[in-house]
Image (cartoon, rainbow, N blue to C red):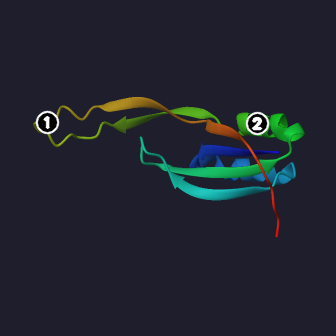
Amino acid sequence: MKIILAIVQDKDSNRLSSEFTKNNVRVTKLSTTGGFLRAGNTTFIVGIEDERIDEVLEIIKETCRSREQYITSPLSLDMPMDVHSAHPIEVKVGGATVFVLPVEGFYHY
């Protein structure tokens, strides 16, 4: 048995949740916030049998897509203010960050 932690952008969260339900994958869903863009994410916690890991990873891969987004670089307090310094920067967001962890024990009370 393994624990899969999948951190996905909120835009992909509902679709992924639906795919998990459709494929009888039980998950715990947590609202989280990313540190870089400070944008909403959803973290899915999946406890799954070893033989279903590839299936779950494929669901995540097919559902969560990366996309380009423009952000304005944050202003630093130690730099002089310049209205021309806040240029939009293109960054890749979305997709999924996935961790697969071993489980030493599973208990259901």
Q: Residue at x 17, y 32 (%)?
A: 84
Q: Based on the displayed image, in which of its 4 quarters is residue 57 positioned?
A: top right
For label 2, the SS is helix
1 or 2: tag closer to the N-terminus: 2
Amino acid type, callout 1: Met
Q: Which residue of the protein is positioned furthest toward the front in this rendering?
A: 104
Q: Residue at x 24, y 35 (%)?
A: 86
Task: Describe residue 91's horizontal placement relative to residue 18 as left or right.
Answer: left
Q: Residue at x 41, y 35 (%)?
A: 70
- Split into 4 quadrants, where in the image is the C terminus? bottom right
Q: Alpha-carbon neighbours of circle 1 within 10 Å: few (<14), some, or many (≥20)?
A: few
x, y (%) of residue 62?
74, 34
Q: Which mark is residue 62?
A: none
For label 1, the SS is loop
Q: Alpha-carbon neighbours of circle 2 within 10 Å: few (<14), some, or many (≥20)?
A: some
Q: Which residue of the protein is positioned furthest toward the left in this rendering?
A: 80
x, y (%) of residue 72?
32, 38
Instruction: Look at mark 2 in the image and give the residue it sits on.
Output: 57
Instruction: Look at mark 1 in the image and give the residue it sits on.
Output: 79
